[in-house]
Image (spheres, rainbow, N blue to C red):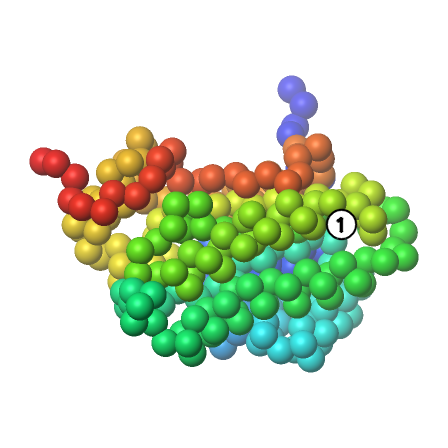
Amino acid sequence: MTTLSFGLQNTHVLVTGASGGIGIETARLFAHLGSRVTAHYNTSPRDLSDPNSSASPNITPIQANVTSESDITRLFDEAESKHGCPVQILIVNHGIFETQNVELADMTLSQWRNTHAVNLDGAFLLCREFLKRLRGQPGEVLDSVSITFIGSTAGKFGEADHSDYATSKAALMYGLVPTLKNEIVRIAPRGRVNAVNPGWVRTPMAEEVIKDEKFVARALASTPLRKVAVPGDVARQVCVVSSPVLSGHVTGVNVMVDGGMEGRCLYPPPA
């Protein structure tokens, strides 16, 4: 029997927001598959730098503010220096979600701008730096190149009382993915751009929201699998989509990891 290979051995992967639930699971899985992983974090590395945790020695945590151009430059400089090669796979996973429900009519401009600055401006700065540094790289580097955004069902179906988050994710999924898939090949002829879009996942960011059983019931009302995902459900799809072997002819795609969700239920489902 032939062993299935992801073709990710020694490939340099940068995962943003890697101290969060999906991010740390994704970083660990890439490391398990033999990748050299740069794990970005904003304020705390959490388990990434804990010698007693299950984080791999192949994972290098680096702090950066994704809304700062100078920080992004430093992030890539340090990543290249520590791993001895340029970043080849970029996983844009970081993001913020305001847990307090706020209708657009009552939302402050500062909340709107802050969410977009982190979720969207940060993605722009990361992709720009990533693509610029790939120019002129040899074929053996370029053959594994890809970008994967972590989107959301909020970007597909909307999210009442969270218009700032929903619009930022929709911009990644339906603005940057189809645009960059056509631009990346000018730099890396085999380069690919996709998005992996989860529904509700049991992560620290969503913890307070999914404590509400009635909310979860509404969220799962149109979901055939009737369960909330765990970070590994998303991480596995990210690695599959990033693999030049398993997904080498897959680009411009939005992979929904949402249990088959068909929409939003605004009211409690019938008993």
| Residue lying at the far top of the rendered structure | 1
Regarding residue 53, the answer to whether it shows in the image is no
> Residue 6 appears at what percent x and percent y?
66, 37
Give the residue pinned by disc 1: 183
- Tell me the SS state at disc 1: helix
**Quadrant of image for the N terminus:** top right
What is the quadrant of residue 260 in the picture?
top left
Residue at image point 79% right, 63% down: 132
> Residue 29 appears at what percent x and percent y?
56, 48
What is the quadrant of residue 262 in the picture?
top left
Q: In this view, does 5 lie above or below 84?
A: above
Residue at image point 60% right, 62% down: 123
Q: In this view, does 220 lie above or below 3?
A: below
Q: In this view, does 93 lie above or below 51?
A: above
Answer with left or right where residue 139 lies relative to residue 98.
right
| Residue lying at the far front of the rendered structure | 105
**Quadrant of image for the C terminus:** top left
Residue at image point 64% right, 41% down: 252
> Residue 144 appears at what percent x and percent y?
76, 45
Please name the amino acid that badge 1 sits on.
Glu
